[in-house]
Every structure is written in C-alpha cells, then in structure tokens.
Image: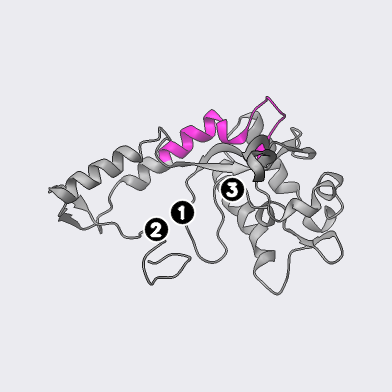
Amino acid sequence: MLIKALCDYAEKQADTGIPEGWQEHGIHYRILLTPEGEIKDIVDVRERVEVPAKGGKTKTELKPKTILLPFRQRKTGVSAYYMDDRPIYIFGLDYDKQNDCLMIANAKRDDPKKHPVLVEHELSFFSDLDSDICRAYCNFLKNWDPLQMMNHPALIRIAKEYSNSSFGFSLGIGMSNLEDDEQFKAKYAELLTDAAQPDDSTSEVICGIIGERLPVARIHDKISGFPGGSTTGCV
C-alpha cells in the first residue's frame, strides 16, 4: 500500500498538462524558411529574465524559449529525432573555434552522418504532409547542402553560439511554427497510438504495485542519479 501511495503521489506531481508523447524543450533560435525551403533569417527567440545576483541585486539573462517538441527517447549512436533541434543534425556543420568559422562536420567522428540521417528520417515522415510549413521544411531538407552553406550570412552571424544552441523552424515570427502544425500533430498522434499497441511478442505480467496485468516494457529509458551508477544514466 505504501508503494502504491507513493506511485499515485508521483503521478500527481508529474501531471503537468503536457500531452503524452511530447516534452518541454528550450530553443534559442527560429529558422525562418521561405516556401522554397531557403533560410530567410535566423532570429533569436530567447527571453530576457531577471535573476538574483550578488549584493541583493538582479541581472538580466537570456533564457531559451520553452516549446513542446516530440518526446526525445535517449538513444546511442547517430539517430535523429522528429523536429531535431541540434545544429549538427540540421546543418551538417561544426563551429571551428580556433578559426572562428563554420566548417564541414568533423570527419574523425560520426558527425558527417548526422545530417543525412536527419534528412532521411524526416522526409520519410513529412513527405506526405501538405501544409505550408511542412512543405517548406521538406524543401529545406532536400536542398540544403552543407558544403555550399558554410558562409551563409544568418549562420555566420550566430557562429560563436552555434554549437550550444537549439533551433526550431517557422515560416516567420508570429506565423506557422513546425511543432504547432496540425497535420504533423495528427500524424504523430497516429504514430503514438500504433506504438502503444502491444504486438504478439509482448509478454504480460501482474504488476506488483497496482495489481493489474500489464505488458512488460521491452526498453527503458536511462535512470540518472542512481547511487554508484554512471552520471550519464544507468540502464
């Protein structure tokens, strides 16, 4: 009973109103696309907030803008997310701090694979969606060539912050944002529903906490903070 009560309490604490399969995520910039998928601008969407400072004073800091993105399941190796916000996946470029410039992703690592993996992942999902922002996003993925875009003025302008920034896509400030697109959300909801359906190989057991017969999870996310465990999480 004690364990059951603790689980009920944890569920109530976790009830944030965020839809199943989504999570809050902070982005620093919006990539504004033309209908043809070209970048017309990259704009800073961080919010200025007052935070405590020494001597009872306050200081202004830039806080990433919180949006809802599809849930990011922790993965190993080169693997893309829906609406990936990571610059190396989006642009296929690295920032060379020594020379203060953007360059093709580091060939000594798996970085060159990341942009093509994102393109394949996203086009396989978005290609049959017909909204303005989805078409623009697909056009961007099809036409973006990292080798030709190292000196894109919008990227050069933010080069020093490039590597540590997260990005979202839009047709313009106050216009269609990719994560808000109704066609995407409808198709993603179908994906979540299909994923929740147990397959023939799924085993069911009696849960020791709530006493119901439930499918056994095949894969668990990493658990961080486990005593004696890795700081990156335990499986």
Badge 2, how many Cα within 10 Å: few under 14, some, many 20+?
few
User: Which of pointers 3 and 2 lies earlier in the amino acid sequence?
Assistant: 3
User: Which of pointers 1 and 2 lies earlier in the amino acid sequence?
Assistant: 1
Q: Nearer the viewer, mark 3 or mark 2?
A: 2
* Residue at mark 3 to residue at mark 2: CA–CA distance: 23 Å
Badge 1, how many Cα within 10 Å: few under 14, some, many 20+?
few
Q: Nearer the viewer, residue 75 or 15?
A: 15
User: Residue 73, labelled with which disc?
Assistant: 1
Q: Which secondary structure lies at badge 1?
A: loop
Residue 178 percent location from the top left of the image: 61, 35
Residue 118 percent location from the top left of the image: 62, 54
Residue 75 percent location from the top left of the image: 49, 61
User: Residue 221, labelled with which disc?
Assistant: 2
User: Residue 122, labelled with which disc?
Assistant: 3
Mark 1 in CB contact with mark 2 (< 8 angstroms): yes
Residue 228 higher or lower than 147, as above or below = below
Q: Which secondary structure lies at badge 3?
A: helix
User: Type of residue at label 1?
Assistant: Gln
Measuring 57% from the left and 55% from the top, which residue is drawn there?
80
Residue 95 higher or lower than 209, as above or below = below
Asked if the stretch drawn in magenta spans residue 27, the answer is: no
* Residue at mark 3 to residue at mark 1: CA–CA distance: 16 Å
User: Type of residue at label 2?
Assistant: Asp
Q: Nearer the viewer, residue 205 or 209?
A: 209
Residue 202 percent location from the top left of the image: 25, 57
Quadrant occupied by the C terminus:
bottom left
